Structure formats: C-alpha cells, structure tokens
Image (spheres, grey):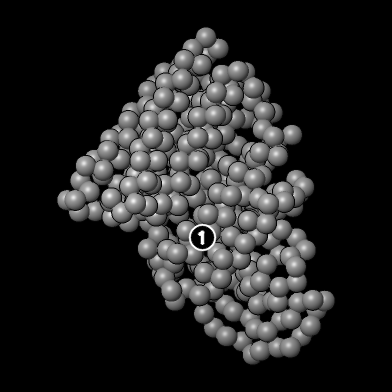
Amino acid sequence: MAEAPQSDETSGNHLVTRRQMVSIGGVTLVATSVGLSGCASVMNTAGLPIFPRADPGAPIPTMVAGAPIGTLGGGTKPIFVAQPGSRDPVAHSVADTLFWGEQMMEHAMFIAMLMPGPELATQRAQAEQYQRQFAAHLAKLRSGRLDAGNYAAFNRTTTSLTRSLLGYKQAMEDAQESGRIRSLVWPSFFDHTRKEGERFAARLDQLNRGDTTYVRGEVIPFWADKMEEHSLFIDQLLDPDETLLKKVSQASATSFAKMEAAPPAREPALAAAQTIIDFKTAAEKGIISGQIKSIINPALADHVRREAVRFKDELMRAA
C-alpha cells in the first residue's frame, strides 16, 4: 500500500484526506478516504475503494435432472439458478437444490476443518458425514430426473437431510457457547449457516406448493443480514496488517446492517449487491494469488462470493 500526499480538498460533505493504493488479484485499486456524511446511498461509506466490476452476466442455459436451468460463473464453481422468467417449480427445485445443497455440503466441510484434534473427533466425524450425505444427494439429483410428479417427494427428502444438519448446527452452537466443546467455529457462524439452511428448507416447502416467487420484502432483509455477517467474518479472518481491506469489510457490514433495518428500493439494493460481488470477487482473486494476507480458505472465499451473486439474482426476480 502506498500513500500519496495528503489533501484538504472539500467536496460537499466529503473531506479527502489521503489516497491509498492496494493491489488485489493483479489489479491496482485506488481508494479515497472520505468523511462519513450520513451515507446518502446504501454503500456510500468511508474509505471504500472502487473494485473492478464483476458482472455475472445472464445465466447460461443448461439441463440438469431433465430440467432447464441456468448457471452463473466467475469463480471456481458454477452458481445454479432458474432461467430468467421461469415459473416452473421443478426447475426452481433443481436449481435451488444444486445451489443450496452445495452450500450445505460446504458448511459441513468448513465446520469439520475448524474442529481439529482428537477431543473433537466425534463432532468432526459428524460434520464429515453430513458433507458426504449432501454430496451423495446432489449426485443422485444429477443422475436422476425430476418432473411434476416426483419433484415434491425429492424436495421432502432434501428438506429432511437439511433439517438434520440444522439440528447438528444448533447442538454445536449450544455446545460452543456453553464451553462444552472448544472448536474454532464461532457460535455466530453456526447461527449464520443454520439460518441459511432454514431458509432453504422453507423455500423447498414453498416450491412444493407450486409457488416460485421471490418477495423483495423478504429477499433484501435476509441477504442484507447474510452480507453483513460475511463482511464481519472477512474482517476477523484478514491479517491485522490488511488495514484497508479490514476497513472495507467493516464499512460494508455497517451498510448492510442499515439495509436490513430499512430495506431500500430495488435499484439501490441492486447497486449494493453488485458492490459486494465486486469486493468478494477481487478478494477471492487476491486470496488465491497470495496477494491478500489472511486465514481465509479459497473455498470459503468462493462460497461467500456465490451467495452474493445469488442475492443479486433473487433481487432481480423479486416482486
């Protein structure tokens, strides 16, 4: 990071005090430090660099389990979504199960990674078992075929497996909070991932009723909460020397907390979603290339990026 000469330029309510340079993923980013002015727009917070735009673009059509769905890219794994304009509960079920099933599988993987040592062998083995179960369930989906006659039954099987994992997460959260286990998993991470699973199960119940809609009044608060928590997690996992990126993470968390408390209109929400996609995409590249100092596993970086992309996709579909 290089410092340029300080300035006392005043523009409206913003006082420009310095310019910072940071290289992430091979791209040099310029960050202007500004004073807080009440955040006129959702992401107009102090010290945020302008990251390269990472637009996931339109879904690429594909077929899985006999259903026409789409994929969005930009990272190490595809992001499964329904095709634009689709109202087919079968296609939505396939896309949502492929996406959220992968996320549930990775939740189990991350939990297992953060439970080292012989004293946590039992709990770690349970997490690894859930990882294998979700992998097998996704493989079954890919090799099978869903239609109007059987998709609801398959969704109920998915929901049952998901709710079993939710019970495990709740038990581990309680054990970690009470000191009965001493893992490296924050109680808030158990809570975060459990709430994502609860929403996934509720979504499958909704699709079983033939309802594929997204409602902006639910989409924005849910994802704003998840983006806030992601930002807080990133802040805590960055090396203490990564002061600019920690500042970005903290400012992002503050902005999304405000968004959750007072959901904005569609366009500002879309702008905020794109901003967090840009940040996470640049951070993932920096982590993979070793240009960012952190203890963030590249798989976790891609995991949270995929969820940011889904946020934007759901918001674009929401009524």
**Residue 203 locus on image (x, y percent):** 56, 29
* Residue 69 visible to the viewer: no
Q: Is residue 218 above or below residue 6?
A: above
Q: Which sits in the foreground, 139 or 273? A: 273
Q: Answer few, some or many: residues within 10 Å of disc 1's Cα (few below 14, many 20 plus, some between 14 and 19).
A: some
Q: Which residue is at 71% across, 65% downward?
A: 44
What amino acid does circle 1 point to? Leu
Q: Is residue 267 above or below residue 90?
A: below
In the picture as drawn, the residue positioned furthest to the front comes out as 178
**Residue 296 locus on image (x, y percent):** 40, 59
Residue 169, picture quadrant? top left
Q: Which residue is at 57% across, 77% downward?
A: 21
In the picture as drawn, the residue positioned furthest to the right comes out as 12
Q: Is residue 190 above or below residue 9?
A: above
What secondary structure is found at the residue carrying circle 1? helix
Number of numbered markers: 1
- Is residue 298 found left or right of 311 in the rendered image? left
Residue 250, picture quadrant? bottom right
In the picture as drawn, the residue positioned furthest to the left comes out as 118
Q: Which residue is at 57% across, 85% downward?
A: 3
**Residue 314 locus on image (x, y percent):** 64, 38
- Is residue 311 found left or right of 200 in the rendered image? right
* Residue 147 visible to the viewer: yes
Name the residue that disc number 1 marks. Answer: 232
Q: Which residue is at 50% across, 40% downward?
A: 196
**Residue 37 locus on image (x, y percent):** 75, 71
Specify the quadrant that holds the C terminus. top right
- Is residue 315 found left or right of 204 in the rendered image? right
Q: Which sits in the foreground, 182 or 72? A: 182
